[in-house]
Image: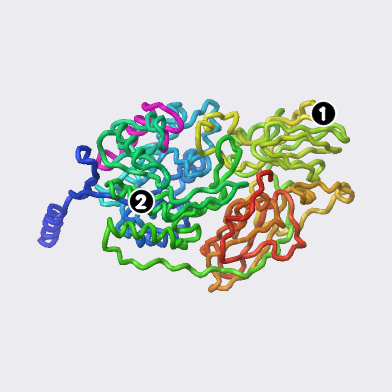
Amino acid sequence: MYFVLFALLLSVSYAAAAPKREFYVDWESDRFVKDGATFQYASAGMHYFRIPPQYWENRISAAKSAGLNAVQTYVAWNMHEPEPGKYDFNDMLDLIGFIKAVQAYDMVLILRVGPYICAEWNFGGLPPWLLSYPNMQVRTQNEDFMAAMKRWFDVLLPLIKPHLYANGGPIIMVQVENEYGSFGCDHEYISRIYTMMHDTLGQEVVYFTTDGKREWELNCGVTSPILATVDFYPLDNAPEILARLRRHQPQGPLVNSELYAGHCDELKSRHETTDAHELGVALDYLLSVGASVNLYMWHGGSSFGWGAGSTDFNTSFFTQSYDFDAPQSESGDVKLDKYWAIRNVTSRYFPGNKMPVPIPWPRLTGISLKPTLKGYLIDHMTLLGSHKLPLTMEQMGVFKGLAAYQHTLEKPIVNKTVQIDGVHDRAYVLADGIFVQVVKRESEVNFTVSASKTITVIVENMGYIGFSKAMLDYSAEYKGIKGVSVDGMAIEMWEHFAIDIENLSTISNGPNGTTSLEQNRLEYSRNGKKLLERGPAVFVETVTLQYDQLKDTFVNITRAWSKGYLIVNGQLIGRYWPDAGPQYTLFVPGVYLVEGLNSFTLIELQSANLTIEKSVYLTDKPYIDGPYNKTA
């Protein structure tokens, strides 16, 4: 009993002696205060959901070695709540594990919880199932949206509260929405989100908004009493932009929440790069005037799975790689020009850094794959029901990947003109099981078809819009088709199917036997390549690896292939599109490989030339800056 009493008194005395942890804004002095001292940060932007958890430590330690003292990350609502009320915080989504990894390196964390995050991520981080609500208007005070957000915050915010800086964790700041001034101008909407956060997290964390540099963006985004921050590029006029921010918020610390250390890539466009010297100059200026800054991105990572989103009205789509030309590459190598541009600056403002420069990891290379045809998607469709007119994919409850529509003809059609209306985003058309046409969203076309039994339309969702007011326009944002007509007459009664490509990598049987039509089929083509006979297909190769070969690698998918998805050992790596460029390699982390047999599955949607040697191979070098084709 005496020992217990002594221990209790000792713990009380320690608690009384321990200094109070605090982080707050000193508005009058225009500064952050951390534990009684002025605090300025230079943070590393990285997204835990784009990085295998086994690599978090590497990415965080590399950032610290560059002299950065903080980490900034978004929280992707759509990943954590893939279905209403079903939550996932495992593996790459172990948010608390990431928070602890940051703290282990004695760095603080800026958490951008949204609910909207942009990030070139699918639907800007919002769950696409929101679009199943008939009157949904995202990022507004629409009550369905606000209720869904509140249910999510009721799960998320209590999880992170114990990890606020005041509670012993690393989280010093939490963002309210994201770049809202570029989207809307409803300050009450921002205030309602702030109230939701404040009701759970309290006032011992700093809340902030981030907006673009333009007057109208700041006018609509800055909302009292939340700290306002801004984002801009290294070559932008920093003094002018900071002065503009000061006019909107006369007091408080200055922050650039996104100093762009690179730029994202879009399919069908050139690979973007930025200058290291210009980045260093901009960082130096911001720190010299007392501003805090986040490098967006320090490390971009990969938009694994269905992560890559699209731009305004789905006219273009982001690459699977989110390398961003960031100081730390997609695979974890530091780009020494940008690395030293940053470290040479931070050493003057945050002296004492003695950490070594990160060295590259060895990679797996020199293995050629020869995938063989295992089956066609048309043979692996799951019937959902029949409807008079085509439903959207959202109405089917299919929010990612592929779906299909099939109509059985009452009588054969011969050389008839077919029109598919409202293709979102890309359609693969079969007549009696024969692949006859690819229809893309940007240029829906009429084409001639002969068929005696069925018309099948497989539709690909290539990612939801993640930026701008286009997100409000559901008529532009749905996935699927609106209708099909033959010689101007609408076809009615369609069977609707889901296609789960993530469960097709284990197909072991070969393709079904050919039909009589295939013996004399026309050679339908796209981009000068012969279309696959029976439509989108599954190709598989298995490779035996030894333990010492379990290293990071890049899978180079050449132009012998056209467009599709790569799955490695059941893990959806993401989409490939060598017909479009500029990305030709997909990063496969070594932790996705296993000792023994490894399966590499290509879900090819258009065409494949299996006669070409080395059409798919493993390499130690990325190829994300190749030629591109705007008409793919």
Residue 11: x percent and y percent? Answer: 15, 56
Q: Is residue 306 above or below residue 585?
A: above
Query: Which SS type dominates the magenta stretch?
Result: helix
Q: Nearer the viewer, mark 2 or mark 1?
A: 2
Q: CA distance from mark 2 to mark 1?
A: 62 Å
Q: Would you say residue 197 sits in the magenta stretch?
A: yes
Secondary structure under the numbered disc 1 in the rendered image: loop
The residue that label 1 is drawn on is 487
Magenta stretch bounds: 177-205
Where's the N terminus, which quadrant?
Answer: bottom left
Three-letter amino acid code at the position of disc 2: Leu
Q: Is residue 94 visible?
A: no
Residue hosting label 2: 283
Q: Could you say where residue 75 lies in the image, as x and y percent from the top left?
A: 42, 45
Rendered image quadrant of residue 434: top right
**Apparent side of residue 467 relative to residue 575 in the rendered image (left or right):** left
Question: What residue lies at 68% left-to-right and 43% top-to-bottom?
Answer: 631
Circle 2: element type: helix
Vertical placement of residue 424 versus 14, above or below: above
**Foreground: 497 or 401?**
401
Q: How is the image coloured?
A: rainbow
Residue 111 in picture, x, y percent from top left: 36, 46
In this rendering, would 420 be left or right of 618? right
What is the x, y in percent for residue 247?
30, 32
Left/right of residue 137 with respect to residue 103 in the rendered view: right
The foreground one among 505 and 585 is: 585
89 is within the stretch colored magenta: no
At label 1, the amino acid type is: Asp
- Foreground pick, 226 / 435: 226
